[in-house]
Image (cartoon, coloured by chain):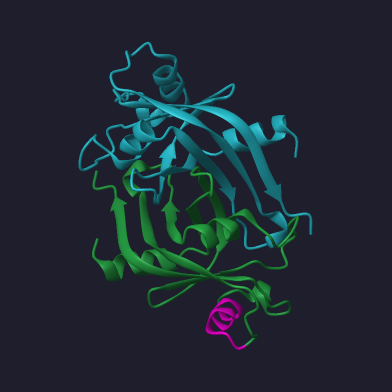
Chain colours: A cyan, B green
Amino acid sequence: MQTPELRRRFASSPVAYLSTVRPDGGPHVVPMVFALVDDTVYSAVDAKPKRSRGLQRLANVRANPRCALLVDHYDDDWRRLWWVRADGRGLVVDEPSAAHPGIQALVQRFPQYRDDAPSGPLLVITVERWSGWASTA
Amino acid sequence: MQTPELRRRFASSPVAYLSTVRPDGGPHVVPMVFALVDDTVYSAVDAKPKRSRGLQRLANVRANPRCALLVDHYDDDWRRLWWVRADGRGLVVDEPSAAHPGIQALVQRFPQYRDDAPSGPLLVITVERWSGWASTA
């Protein structure tokens, strides 16, 4: 698959799996809803109930900006499997304004955010490499 | 959620997202089909077409055994979201016999493997910690 097709498939999913590295060197992975604008992925710590906004994912990115994001398509028919991975670097915007392009993109994409826009922190990941796999069976 | 419920939800999914750390310290994530037996997760490099069996995930686990596995339930109704994560340590069995309990568990779980059992390498991950999140909205 070429980059435009990888980007298109990635953007078709509401959820991606964010893999980062913990400060102690171990792997960490969480799901996140996101919006893709060109080669930038935005995701917010939002009103979905969490224990706190001091999330592990944010601590990880602050300490090591490298991020790997996965979008997966599973099917019991294994001839239809595919996945796309975006590798890049993230940064945390602690207090984005409502006009931040990332907040705007998330609100535009998700009706769930319309009445309760995320206030942040906002995770901004610049994709440096697209890769993927599709069954050719 | 208590551990039995976390384990039950994890086992309900055919696919998990495996996060590992690359030898250069960056994060890596791929989907994998798996079978869970007690606190052991088995996954095989199988006949689904890959460029090679010398996969990045195996190189990562050989260099750093720490693994994080995610099972996710997404729903447009965000009151129904949940995910489960299993943190543990992996090892690679390069040439498992057909009688290996991991191969047996995979073949038993997936009809897709019945005519073409995976020959390995086999990834064996011992779960040391279950965690998870469910929307309570």
The answer to whether residue A47 is seen in the rendering is: yes
Judged by its main secondary structure, the magenta piece is: helix
A94 with respect to B104 (left or right): left
Q: Is residue B81 above or below residue B42?
A: above
Does the magenta portion include B107? yes
Q: Residue furthest right?
A: A137
Residue at (50% x, 56% y) in the render:
B18
In x, y percent, where is residue A105? Answer: 46, 21
Task: Report if residue A7 lies within the magenta region.
Answer: no
Q: Is residue A34 left or right of residue A83?
A: left
Q: Quadrant of the N terminus of chain B?
A: bottom left
Residue closest to the far bottom: B99
Q: Tell me what residue is drawn at x 32 percent, y 17 percent.
A: A96
Q: Is B129 drawn above or below residue B22 in the view shown?
A: below
- Left or right of residue A8, residue B1 in this image: left
Q: Residue at x 38, y 68 (%)?
A: B127
- Residue at the image point whose x is 79% and y is 59% from the top: A137
In this view, the residue in front, B36 or A113, is: B36
Residue B50 percent across, percent down from the top left? 73, 57
What percent of the width, then of the height, locates residue A91? 40, 26
The correct choice, above or below, for B48 with respect to B81 in the image is below
Residue B135 is situated, as x and y percent measured from the top left of the image, at 28, 47
The magenta stretch is B99-108
Decide if residue A12 is in sight here: no
In the rendered image, which quarter is residue B69 located in? bottom left
Q: What is the quadrant of the C terminus of chain B in the image?
A: top left
User: Which residue reaches farthest top?
Assistant: A99
